[in-house]
Image: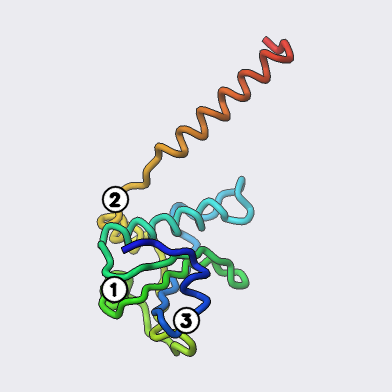
Amino acid sequence: MPRLAWTDLASSPGTAFLLVGELTPCFAGGRREDDPFDSARLRFAANLIVRTCSHLKLKGPFAVQPSREGNMLVIQCAVTELQDFLRLADLTGGREIEASLWRGHRHFQLDDPKHVSLLAIAGPPDGRGAGRRARAASRESEEQRHRWGQD
């Protein structure tokens, strides 16, 4: 089923189930000095969850949202179908917590062993976009260097 915008499911939590993955300090090699806000790890984790949901061929729509809650980095995943929620809960483990507004709510740790198990389902990231952007930036830098006569 299709991926929806986060606001589509978050605006009506009574129709969806929520899984929240908290990134552990060791996830994806840990925090890098050149990324003080940990944006790359957060983006990487969100993409991993999206790929996992896509490869599982969920029955209903889903939405994924990276977030910062205090000092924690979290990935929120909302699904509309109970069967999808149970499949993801089985894969991610974790614990059930008070659902409050949601139909169901689970919390799990996104650590390196979980990364490996989800990667087995999701497959490796698609690096084509990153390569294209890197090549475009390199070309732009090269063109700028020639424009200013910095050979």
State how far apart marks 2 and 3 are (Cα). Answer: 29 Å
Percent position (x, y) of residue 102?
A: 44, 84
Mark 2 against mark 3, which lies toward the viewer? 3
Kind of element beneath mark 1 = helix
- Which residue does the image show at 26% across and 55% down from the upper left? 120
Classify mark 3: residues with Cα within 10 Å, few (<14), some (14-19) or many (20+).
many
Classify mark 1: residues with Cα within 10 Å, few (<14), some (14-19) or many (20+).
many
Give the label on residue 13, or none: 3
State how far apart marks 3 and 1 are (Cα). Answer: 16 Å
Mark 2 against mark 1, which lies toward the viewer? 1
Percent position (x, y) of residue 76?
A: 46, 70
Amino acid type at image mark 1: Asp
Percent position (x, y) of residue 144?
A: 67, 20
* Residue on which disc 2 sits: 123
Amino acid type at image mark 2: Gly
Q: Quadrant of residue 88?
A: bottom left
* Residue on which disc 1 sits: 84
In-front residue for pair 45/65 = 65
Classify mark 2: residues with Cα within 10 Å, few (<14), some (14-19) or many (20+).
few
